[in-house]
Amino acid sequence: MTAAYLDARRREILTAAVAQFAEKGFEHTSMADIAAAAGISIGAVYRYFPSKNDLVLSVCGEGEGEPVPGKTVAEAVGHLHRQVAPQENGSTHARLVAQIWGNAAIDDVLASTVARRHADVRDQLAALISRGRSCADGERPAASDEAEVVLAALIGYAALVAAEAPVDHAGFERVLSRLLD
């Protein structure tokens, strides 16, 4: 088996896990559910992930160290918004985000994984914000603080989408963009 094959199989399992976790929640999804959704044996799932907790941590840490798509703040924030916006089919991801943050509040290991990923994205956004500022922008808050507020807004928005609460989606995107002007 080649490294490419093994990586593709691992990605298939992660994709199936995301769908199952979003639909049923972490607690109500079994490794057998994930194996069935991936179309592989349960033994193959365990070969890549020794436990469901390892699989949850992998899903939550996915993308760590990878750049957020976008060369500008607007592009990066737009990408992050689309990940959880229902009109962009982000409801699945929104349900996953809400679960991740909820479970991170009671699971120290998960909290550590989520905090690292969050800091990574925050720092990338802060760098984009800093790059887009002119010298006259000295009165604005620190770029890292602005990035933190944007991410907190997106996490809250994901929770609203996950709960199917009434939200003015276009209004949210407009205001979020305006905050970064």
Image (tube, rainbow, N blue to C red):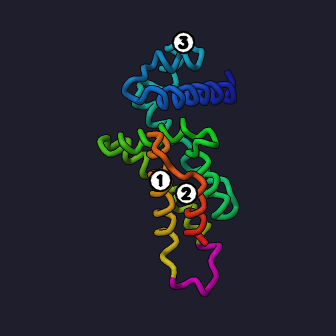
Residue 103 sits in quarter: top left
Q: Tell me the distance, in whole angstroms, between the alpha carbons under discs 3 and 2.
A: 43 Å
Where 170 falls versus 3 (above or below)? below
Q: Which of disc 1 and disc 3 is earlier in sequence? A: 3
Q: Which residue is mark 1?
A: 118
Who's the residue at 58% across and 83% down the image? 137
- The mark nearer the N terminus, 3 or 2, is 3
- The picture places residue 66, in percent across and down from the top left corner, at 61, 50
State which tag comes first along the sequence, 1 or 2. Answer: 1
Closer to us: mark 3 or mark 1? 1
Q: Is residue 166 visible?
A: yes
Residues in magenta? 130-139
Asked whether the residues under the numbered discs 3 and 2 touch, taking CB atoms below 8 Å apart as contact, a structural biologist would say no
Q: Amino acid at mark 3?
A: Ser
- Measured as percent of width and height from the top left, residue 153 is found at 47, 57
Q: Position of residue 125 (x, y in %)?
A: 57, 62
Q: Given contact means CB atoms under 8 Å apart, are the residues at marks 3 and 1 in contact?
A: no
Q: Which residue is at 61% across, 26% downward? A: 12
Gap between marks 3 and 1 measured at Cα: 33 Å
- The residue where tag 2 is placed is 172
